[in-house]
């Protein structure tokens, strides 16, 4: 998997998709940071995922799944995968209250006009779930992450 075009993907991982456009362009329009008080309040999901190292391993598994999936890999051909990986890790850290700064565009901005379908979205989410299982992330923790990412679905699909 060399480059890709985040246009069609990344989901629910909403994070993914958001990170996707940032990877493709190399520039983000929005800086997001979780307030340190909010982070201190609940960093349990970030910890449960294995913090930075665990999230990086999940992202690596996700990228491997995308690279092998002919349904969606073509959407990433123009994407700088190294930058995409970095943005995705930042985004997942952000949404799990890890206190990270995400430099990518908003989900809505990054997916506008990309025509991401339910099938594309589902394929990506399936790879995310598979990657979490490979990392032995417990079911409750997987569901907690998916719940947080699901709120971005409408910003990603059919745009």
Image (tube, rainbow, N blue to C red):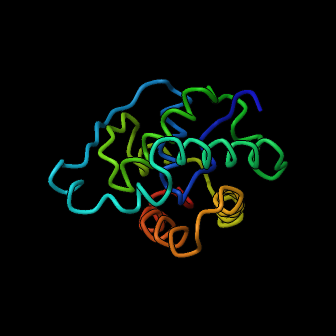
Work out whether 101 lies above or below 69. above
What residue lies at 42% left-to-right and 66% top-to-bottom?
148
Quarter of the figure with the N terminus: top right
What residue lies at 52% left-to-right and 75% top-to-bottom?
140
Percent across and percent down for residue 113 are 54, 47
Percent across and percent down for residue 5 are 64, 36
Quarter of image, res 120:
bottom right
Q: Nearer the viewer, residue 115 or 7?
A: 7
Percent across and percent down for residue 127 are 70, 57
Q: Nearer the viewer, residue 142 or 123?
A: 142
Work out whether 122 lies above or below 96. below
Work out whether 82 lies above or below 14. above
On screen, residue 80 versus residue 95, left or right, reads: right
Q: How many marks?
A: 0
Q: Nearer the viewer, residue 41 or 68?
A: 41
Quarter of image, res 129:
bottom right
On screen, residue 80 versus residue 102, left or right, reads: right
Percent across and percent down for residue 89 are 49, 41
What residue lies at 39% left-to-right and 56% top-to-bottom?
96
What residue lies at 47% left-to-right and 45% top-to-bottom?
18
């Amino acid at each position: 998997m060399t480059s890709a075009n985040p246009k069609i993907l990344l989901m629910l991982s909403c994070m993914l998709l958001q990170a996707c456009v940032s990877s493709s362009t190399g520039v983000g329009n929005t800086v997001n940071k979780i307030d340190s008080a909010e982070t201190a309040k609940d960093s349990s999901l970030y910890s449960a995922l294995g913090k930075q190292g665990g999230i990086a391993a999940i992202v690596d598994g996700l990228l491997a799944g995308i690279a092998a999936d002919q349904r969606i890999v073509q959407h990433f051909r123009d994407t700088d995968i190294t930058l995409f990986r970095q943005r995705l890790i930042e985004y997942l850290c952000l949404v799990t209250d890890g206190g990270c700064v995400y430099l990518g565009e908003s989900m809505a901005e990054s997916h506008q006009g990309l025509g991401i379908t339910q099938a594309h979205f589902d394929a990506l989410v399936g790879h995310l779930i598979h990657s979490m299982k490979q990392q032995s992330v417990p079911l409750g923790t997987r569901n907690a992450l998916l719940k947080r990412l699901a709120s971005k679905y409408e910003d990603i699909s059919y745009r």
